[in-house]
Image (tube, grey):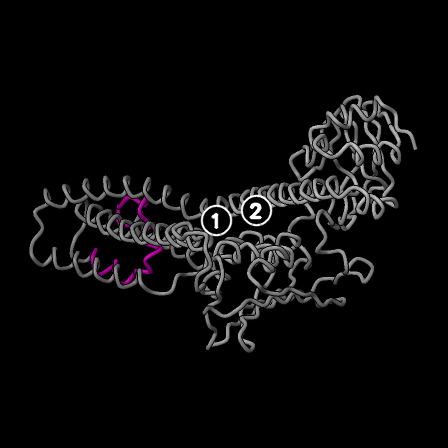
Amino acid sequence: MIADPALLSRLAQHRVLGAAPAAEHAWLAGHGTLRRLAVGDVLAHKGEQATSLYVLFTGHIAIHMDRGAGAHVLIEQRGGEVTGHLPYSRGTMAPNDVVAEEPTELLAVPRELLPEMIRECPVITATMVHAMVDRARHITSSDLRDEKLLSLGKLAAGLAHELNNPASAAVRSARTLATSLAVSETAAATLGAARLSGEQLAAVNRVREQCRAAADSTPLAAVELADREDAIATWLGQHGADDACAGALAETGLSLAALDALAATIDGEALDAALQSIAAGCLVRTLTSELETSASRIYDLVEAVKGFTFMDHAPTPEPVDIRRGISDTLTMLRAKTRVKSAEISVRFAPDLPRAQAVGAEVNQVWMNLIDNALDAVGHGGHVDVSASREMDHVVVRVIDDGPGIPDAIRGRIFDPFFTTKGVGEGTGLGLDIVRRLVQRHEGEIDVQSRPGRTEFRVSLPVAR
């Protein structure tokens, strides 16, 4: 078969294949078909395998994907590269349409001829295998990066939601605290000017101590609290005192009998100042307790993030506490759990050993599996997470009571870009990333599913 000299010349100048022997160029030229694509032409459709090996001379082809933030380029190749069905490739499905971004010219060699090409063109075959390995490495790196960014977005949203409540409570308490301190200082000055006797001061201190003791009791229900505030406001009005402190006194649970005892000893402006001072003091203690609780909650969340990301650890395998990783993951997903009103039960074997793993990576596994389980269950659903030792492996199970995985797609759930979620809701990378991470740790993952029960089982080696 006599090849077109112009085509041979273009193959000799090709960036990837140009160094191959002339005889191998001749084989490609004699068995390939020159094709031209206009802008927008589809070289391969989504879900289809490539029908040929493509040697790109000029132009630009790309695959776009929408991963929730608008379409962006997933894979792109230009003139001087090779693509399509390469030698020894598994012939995976295209994740989306392969579209010409600009006028493109290429040589198409049918994949049925690749066994012959492998025999006749060893140099070109080796070159294409290297190109395939580089392409797989690039796609894997891109997938991992994109999935990590998407997971980071989910974590940031959940963490912001979790931090907002204690942070808002702390700000609110701090502002009220400043006002309460000002009231307390004014009341203290008024009491000092009243020149109370020792007996009167003792009466004020007795009520103050009762107030502290009552503040540590069980909080009242909203209706009971409202009734108490009304009763105390009425009492204050009857004794010529400012009823602005009624709310603070009501929250302490202080009895009207104690207030009557105080009024029997002190009256007038001194009584009002004493009550203002007592109420402000109780409120200050309540606010400082709320500030401590809020700060502790924020601290716990920050510690959970540090534990989840292993930010102070090198990314190398080490003995990892699976219990801590799962607990930190559940903390990160607490906001989503509340939105779904889901119940998550956690069971750890008492003798659970550490696993040999990169902590941040296995936490990514738990994040994806538990997040998917929460997506699967209905409102008020149940997710069960357990970890135990089986022989020389740590086995983690994530079970949900969702509708299950249909038999027709169960074999594809670990495929890259396969998702049952709507556009922008899922990338189809989560379970693929999970599979890769588990395999990287010399572990195994499998799934069993039926309506009402889906179980993902992950097995990791026990720490050496």
Q: Residue at x 91, y 29 (%)?
A: 2
Residue 117, numbered circle = none
| Number of the front mark, 2 or 1 | 2
Direction from residue 18 to residue 393 in the image, left or right: left
Task: Confirm whether residue 99 shows in the render.
Answer: yes
Task: Please give the residue where the numbered disc 2 appears in the rendered image.
Answer: 151
Q: Residue at x 14, y 41 (%)?
A: 189
Query: Could you tell me which quadrant the C terminus lies in?
Result: bottom left
Q: Quadrant of residue 251?
A: bottom left
x%, y% of residue 29? Answer: 85, 31
Q: Residue at x 51, y 43 (%)?
A: 156
Direction from residue 31 to residue 275 in the image, left or right: left
- Could you tell me what secondary structure mostly forms the magenta stretch? helix
Magenta residues, start to end = 237-263
Pick whichever, 438 or 89, lies toward us.
89
Amino acid at the residue labelled 1:
Glu
Q: Is residue 56 above or below residue 310?
A: above
Task: Please give the residue where the numbered disc 1 appears in the rendered image.
Answer: 162
x%, y% of residue 90? Answer: 77, 51
Q: Tell me whether the residue at label 2 lies in contact with that at label 1, contact meaning CB atoms closer than 8 angstroms.
A: no
Label 1 environment density (alpha carbons within 10 Å; few <14, some 14–19, many ≥20): some
Residue lying farthest right? 1
Label 2 environment density (alpha carbons within 10 Å; few <14, some 14–19, many ≥20): some
SS at badge 1 = helix
Q: CA distance from mark 2 to mark 1?
A: 16 Å
